[in-house]
């Protein structure tokens, strides 16, 4: 009982600090912007730990964060193998192939107006479909190893990036394009010097959506068959063995990997589109 | 947007599909022929690639025929009817969608109201979307079993709700904040209270944003439901059909389930679009 009360008290205190922090004189500073969510996250973990201990929740239902942390520290080698299999081989390679294919297709579509009018509605339509459904088919075609996961990821990231890129390439005004023409710029010159840079905010929007999709695709494809490594494989087998601390460890790794992936793409975006209003100020 | 280019593209895709079917399935045909010692002509090979029972890539008309058979010609109560499985998936999708939308709107209201809540929760809401939710799916199933929820719908609904919650949250925050200072000042000069400003200005102003997010959310909810059906050991639903097709090596089941899911997604998005037009017309937006 003491655990429950203590954790609830800790929660209340941290929340009170947060209220003071955000509404106080420091509320608009960078420290408060980072501090508030960190404190909130810490409060959640404390609450979790306290409730699990205080209410004697069995470890096969919900292990406390401290146990999960110990599992992570104790099985770094397994986690690393799974990370390489699912993230580096499956998600990342598929992501790169899919994005490059989408960018190339977008330029081709942009070149041919007929394709733009035909392919864009189709692409928009497909982007709304549950594409994860191709996972079993890809596993049938490319086997159990990472190639099939990468194939699912390629298809999943292709359409959002394509639709956003084509949209972005149209984002220049007639005035800007005319200026390029008065400089006697050819198609490729005006593409690389004007329209592609102008499309970058849109392209990165697609790229950021695609980061999440890539990990989802790689993990879902593992449910349909996998060699004996990989995050999705580990999660489904450990759930069967009631090794929930390992499951949560994998979830933590997946969460960190997903967040870092997104963060890296967002950081690149910041460097590339430093001129855009949303990045200033 | 004209119809002709779209039709040409669709026709090209179908033609490519047929070509792919011939190329991919011919390996099996040639293997069979070599085993029997026959030497099939090209037209025989092509004919065979279109009519295999377990093709690598079934031809479009095979998928269409199978789709027709498992929807129109099977009784709806039959375990092989895709109408039956689709209905299971649809039900969970809608439950998850409504749950997610309610939570999204509620949290958006809280965040617009409280700066502390915004600064503490919003970064986590964003981070939560970079986490592959599917990793959590088996976990959610175990947890809900452990707390005594026998109903298999619940974990799927939670996953679907989780996926549809975020687009609603983001759009609603944007929408509730969309009225500018001038409009709010106008209502203040009318001596409107905070509640009145909310119900007469902020809420109506957020509706277009709300409906735009609904289309994203319903598609996301369907994805969540299908993904949720994979590791739940579900035996009903489109996701379960895909898993069964994969485990028993029945490509036709996978393909029909995939297309059924695609058709369902299209219908849901169209339905939400219709609702949007209706609501906006009732509010007088469409007249402009």
Image (spheres, coloured by chain):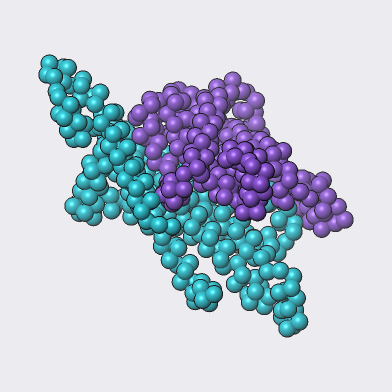
Chain colours: A purple, B cyan
Spot occupied by residue A3 in the image (x, y as percentages of width and height):
69, 44
- Residue furthest to the right in view is A25
In this rendering, does residue A281 appear at all? yes
In this view, the residue in front, A212 or B143, is A212
Residue A252 visible in image: no
- Residue B175: name its quadrant: bottom right
Q: Residue at x 45, y 62 (%)?
A: B272
**Residue A101 at what x, y percent from top left?**
49, 34
Residue A99 position (above or below residue B173): above
How many dots with numbers? 0
Q: Position of residue A142 (x, y in %)?
A: 38, 26
Image check: B90 left or right of B113? left
The answer to which image quadrant residue A225 occupies is top left
Residue drawn at x 60%, y 59% is B171
- The residue drawn where x is 29% and y is 28% is B24
Q: Nearer the viewer, residue B236 or A9?
A: B236
Q: Image height check: is B191 above or below A205?
A: below
Return the residue nearer the eye: A147 or A172. Answer: A172
Q: Is residue A130 left or right of residue B202?
A: left
Task: Specify whether A113 is left or right of B87.
Answer: right
Foreground residue, B52 or B287? B287
Q: Residue at x 45, y 67 (%)?
A: B275
Which residue in the rendered view is the most extreme toward the bottom? B190
- Quarter holding the C terminus of chain B is bottom right
- Residue B94 is situated, as x and y percent measured from the top left of the image, at 43, 58
Classify the position of the N terminus of chain B by image quarter.
Answer: bottom left
């Amino acid at each position: 009982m003491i655990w429950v009360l203590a954790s609830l008290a800790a929660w209340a205190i941290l929340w009170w600090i947060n209220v003071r922090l955000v509404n106080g004189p420091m509320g608009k500073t960078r420290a408060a912007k980072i501090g508030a969510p960190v404190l909130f996250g810490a409060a959640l973990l404390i609450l979790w730990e306290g409730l699990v201990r205080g209410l004697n929740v069995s470890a096969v239902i919900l292990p406390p964060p401290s146990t999960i942390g110990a599992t992570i520290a104790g099985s770094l080698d397994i986690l690393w193998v799974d990370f390489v299999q699912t993230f580096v081989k499956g998600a990342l390679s598929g992501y790169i192939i899919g994005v490059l294919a989408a960018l190339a297709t977008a330029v081709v579509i942009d070149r041919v107006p007929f394709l733009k009018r035909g392919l864009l509605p189709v692409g928009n339509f497909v982007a709304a479909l549950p594409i994860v459904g191709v996972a079993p088919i890809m596993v049938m075609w490319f086997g159990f190893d990472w190639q099939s996961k990468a194939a699912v990821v390629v298809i999943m990231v292709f359409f959002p990036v394509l639709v956003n890129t084509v949209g972005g390439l149209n984002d220049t005004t007639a005035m800007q394009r005319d200026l390029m023409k008065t400089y006697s710029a050819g198609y490729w010159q005006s593409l690389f010097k004007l329209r592609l840079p102008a499309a970058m905010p849109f392209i990165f929007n697609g790229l950021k959506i695609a980061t999440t999709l890539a990990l989802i695709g790689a993990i879902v494809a593992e449910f349909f068959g996998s060699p004996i490594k990989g995050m999705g494989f580990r999660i489904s087998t450990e759930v069967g063995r009631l090794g929930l601390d390992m499951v949560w460890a994998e979830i933590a790794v997946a969460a960190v990997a997903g967040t870092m992936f997104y963060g890296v793409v967002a950081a690149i975006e910041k460097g590339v589109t430093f001129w855009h209003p949303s990045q200033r100020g | 947007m004209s119809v002709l280019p779209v039709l040409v593209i669709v026709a090209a895709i179908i033609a490519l599909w047929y070509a792919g079917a011939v190329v991919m399935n011919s390996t099996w045909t040639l293997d069979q022929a070599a085993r029997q010692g026959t030497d099939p002509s090209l037209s025989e090979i092509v004919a065979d690639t279109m009519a295999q029972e377990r093709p690598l890539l079934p031809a479009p008309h095979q998928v269409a025929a199978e789709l027709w058979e498992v929807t129109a010609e099977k009784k709806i109560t039959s375990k092989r009817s895709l109408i039956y499985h689709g209905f299971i998936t649809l039900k969970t999708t809608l439950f998850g969608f409504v749950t997610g939308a309610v939570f999204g709107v509620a949290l958006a209201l809280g965040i617009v109201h409280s700066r502390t809540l915004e600064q503490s929760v919003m970064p986590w809401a964003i981070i939560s979307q970079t986490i592959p939710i599917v990793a959590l799916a088996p976990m959610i199933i175990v947890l809900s079993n452990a707390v005594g929820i026998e109903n298999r719908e619940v974990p799927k609904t939670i996953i679907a709700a989780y996926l549809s919650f975020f687009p609603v949250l983001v759009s609603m925050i944007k929408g509730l904040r969309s009225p500018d200072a001038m409009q709010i000042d106008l209502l203040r000069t009318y001596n409107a209270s905070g509640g009145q400003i909310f119900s007469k200005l902020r809420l109506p102003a957020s509706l277009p944003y709300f409906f735009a997010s609904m289309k994203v959310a319903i598609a996301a909810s369907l994805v969540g439901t299908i993904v949720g059906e994979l590791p739940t050991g579900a035996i009903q639903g489109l996701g379960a059909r895909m898993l069964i097709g994969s485990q028993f090596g029945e490509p036709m089941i996978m393909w029909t389930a995939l297309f059924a899911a695609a058709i369902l997604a299209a219908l849901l998005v169209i339905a939400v679009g219709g609702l949007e037009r209706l609501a906006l017309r009732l509010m007088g937006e469409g007249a402009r």
